[in-house]
Image: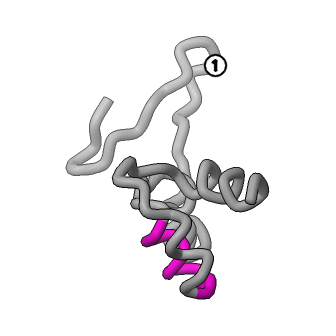
């Protein structure tokens, strides 16, 4: 069921409306860390990792932040 430009879901069992809060500032600020994919060198620069380590991350394959952290742990 839609009310204007807002979509509100309705629980079919209880009949109550389901509404979620808008994203918080913390969610917005960290969205890229969770979902974005960047080149390993871009992640290294964003985390201000020194240039010697940056040179080791010359891969052309984009990876997630979590994958980058796992890559660092391997080094």
Say which quadrant the N terminus sits in: top left
* Residue lying at 52% horizontally and 51% vertically, measured from the top left: 64
From this viewpoint, which residue is outermost toward the right? 73
Q: How is the image coloured?
A: one colour
The answer to whether residue 23 is left or right of residue 72 is left
Which residue corresponds to mark 1? 14
Indicate the position of residue 47 as horizontal and vertical percent values. 60, 80
- Please tell me which residue is depicted at 74% across the width and 60% down the height of the picture: 75
* Front-most of residues 17 and 26: 26
Give residue 26's quadrant in the image.
bottom right
1 left or right, relative to 23 = left
Image coordinates for residue 48, horizontal then vertical, percent? 59, 87
Q: Taking 15 as reference, is 72 above or below it?
A: below
Vertical comparison of 45 with 6: above or below: below
Q: Residues within 10 Å of mark 1 (few under 14, many from 20)?
A: few
- What are the residue bounds of the magenta stretch? 41-50
Drawn side of residue 74 relative to residue 28, left or right: right
By secondary structure, the bulk of the magenta-drawn segment is best described as helix
Please state the horizontal and vertical placement of residue 45, each as a whole percent of the image: 50, 81
Whether residue 23 is visible here, answered yes or no, is no
Q: Tell me the SS state at disc 1.
A: loop
The vertical placement of 11 against 17, above or below, is above
Q: 56 above or below 68? A: below
Question: For the point 59% across and 82% down, which residue is it?
Answer: 52
Q: Residue at x 46, y 70 (%)?
A: 41
> Would you identify the image quadrant in which residue 30 lies?
bottom right
From the top left corner, tell me how far across and down residue 12 is, in percent.
53, 14
Is residue 11 part of the magenta span, yes or no? no
Q: Is residue 59 visible?
A: yes
Q: Nearer the viewer, residue 9 or 37?
A: 37
């Amino acid at each position: 069921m839609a009310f204007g430009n807002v979509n509100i879901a309705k629980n079919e069992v209880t009949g109550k409306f389901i509404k979620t809060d808008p994203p918080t500032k913390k969610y917005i600020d960290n969205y890229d860390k969770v979902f974005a994919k960047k080149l390993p060198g871009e992640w290294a620069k964003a985390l201000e990792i020194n240039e010697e380590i940056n040179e080791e991350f010359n891969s052309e394959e984009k990876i997630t932040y979590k994958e980058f952290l796992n890559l660092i742990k391997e080094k």
